[in-house]
Image: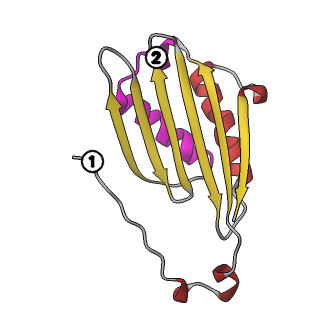
Amino acid sequence: MPRVVYLKFNLAYLPRQAQSFMIRSHHFSAILTATDKIVTMLPAELLGLLKIVVQGAGLNAVSEASAAFEPQGVSVVLILEESHVALHVWTECGKVTVDVHVCDYVQDNYSKAQHLTQLLDQQISGSYDRDRWSYLLATG
């Protein structure tokens, strides 16, 4: 059975300026050609690598999920204090789809999100190319 985490914030405890803060959401996505090492990783190995990379970008993981598919493929997700990052390994194609979603709440996390894309690209494909990534900024 999947683990469900509910987060509830009581705005009364936040500073007044935070109660009216506009949230910005940085969403990066890419389809990367993966190294042989990445394509053959088990879910626990891929989660371990993802945790190290997330920490290296200065972000904070709070929960995780993973799944292995038959006949092939792996998906892993880290829930972050700042939002989430998901990897889906397409073993048969040697590709990894990557979804990085990082929100600003009381600080601008754009540089951390961008650094995370660099670290992920280097770990997954062996090199970084900004042109492989799409970016969407949402505000509200």
Q: Is residue 132 magenta?
A: no
For residue 128, what is the image quadrant? top right
- Tell me the quarter of the picture where residue 92 sits: top left
Q: Nearer the viewer, mark 2 or mark 1?
A: 1
CB atoms of marks 2 and 1 within 8 Å? no
Mark 1 Cα-neighbour bin, 10 Å: few <14, some 14–19, many ≥20 = few
Q: Which mark is residue 39?
A: 2
Q: Quadrant of residue 7?
A: bottom left
Q: In the displayed structure, does residue 49 sit left or right of residue 23? A: left
Q: Residue at x 58, y 26 (%)?
A: 123
Considering the whole magenta stretch, tell me its main secondary structure: helix
Task: Check if residue 48 falls in the magenta segment.
Answer: yes
* Residue with the mark numbered 1: 2
Residue 64 x, y percent position in the rendering: 38, 46
Q: Outermost residue toward the right? A: 131
Type of residue at label 2? Val
Relative to 92, does residue 104 appear above or below in the rendering?
below
Q: Quadrant of the C terminus?
A: bottom right
Callout 1 amino acid: Pro
Q: Secondary structure at mark 2?
A: helix
Read off the magenta span: 36-57
User: What's the CA distance linking mark 2 and mark 1?
Assistant: 25 Å
Query: What is the residue that sits farthest to the left in this orientation?
Result: 1
Residue drawn 55% across the image and 28% down it: 97
Q: How many marks?
A: 2
Under circle 1, the secondary element is loop
